[in-house]
């Protein structure tokens, strides 16, 4: 069975969950995404994208709540209806603005995780792409 790998580490100014923003902001502080070998070569051509989607492992998050009350107002909701970091598989995702790339280090704005968070993947922001195939009969459509 294939193994999963952390491909890097995210460096942010936050060392406490209480201080970490709930959502990243494009005007937030510059944070750094460090890519480990052998994945540095995979950074080729990333600089052509203004925004990246960053996927990361929320390694300090609880994984045991099926229902949560994120506003602490006593109204519990299902975990999958929330963007809470408390999840069965605590994967975080964030769209960030690429500031610069220097070697194996990306400088970005818009992160919302603790310093030292393990990096799962980076991809160009999916909203920058057009669908590959035209809609087909039976495809999901909104109206």
Image: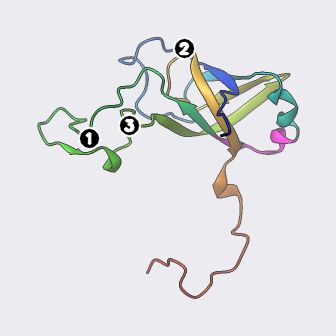
Residue extending farthest left: 74
Left or right, 106 with respect to 24, comes to right
Residue extending farthest front: 1
Q: Residue 40 in the image: x percent, y percent?
A: 83, 27
Q: Nearer the N terminus, badge 1 or badge 2?
A: 2
Q: How is the image coloured?
A: rainbow
Q: Is residue 59 above or below residue 54?
A: above
Q: Nearer the N terminus, badge 3 or badge 2?
A: 2
Q: Residue at x 59, y 37 (%)?
A: 55
Disc 1 to disc 3: CB gap under 8 Å: no
Left or right, 113 with respect to 75, comes to right
Neighbours of disc 1 within 10 Å: few (<14), some (14-19), many (20+): few
Q: Nearer the viewer, residue 82 or 89?
A: 89
Q: Quadrant of the N terminus?
A: top right
Boundaries of the magenta span: 45-53
Image quadrant in which you'd find residue 9: top right
Kindly identify which residue carries mark 2.
Answer: 13
């Amino acid at each position: 069975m294939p193994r999963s790998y952390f491909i890097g580490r995210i460096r942010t100014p936050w060392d406490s969950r209480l201080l970490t923003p709930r959502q990243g902001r494009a005007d937030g502080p510059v944070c750094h995404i460090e890519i480990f070998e052998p994945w540095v070569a995979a950074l080729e051509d990333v600089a052509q994208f203004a925004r990246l989607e960053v996927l990361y492992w929320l390694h300090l998050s609880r994984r045991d709540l099926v229902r949560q009350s994120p506003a602490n107002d006593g109204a519990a909701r299902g975990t999958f209806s929330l963007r809470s970091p408390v999840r069965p598989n605590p994967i975080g995702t964030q769209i960030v603005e690429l500031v610069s790339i220097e070697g194996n280090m990306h400088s970005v704005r818009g992160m919302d995780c603790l310093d030292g968070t393990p990096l799962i993947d980076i991809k160009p922001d999916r909203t920058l792409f057009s669908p590959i195939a035209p809609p087909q009969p039976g495809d999901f459509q909104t109206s």
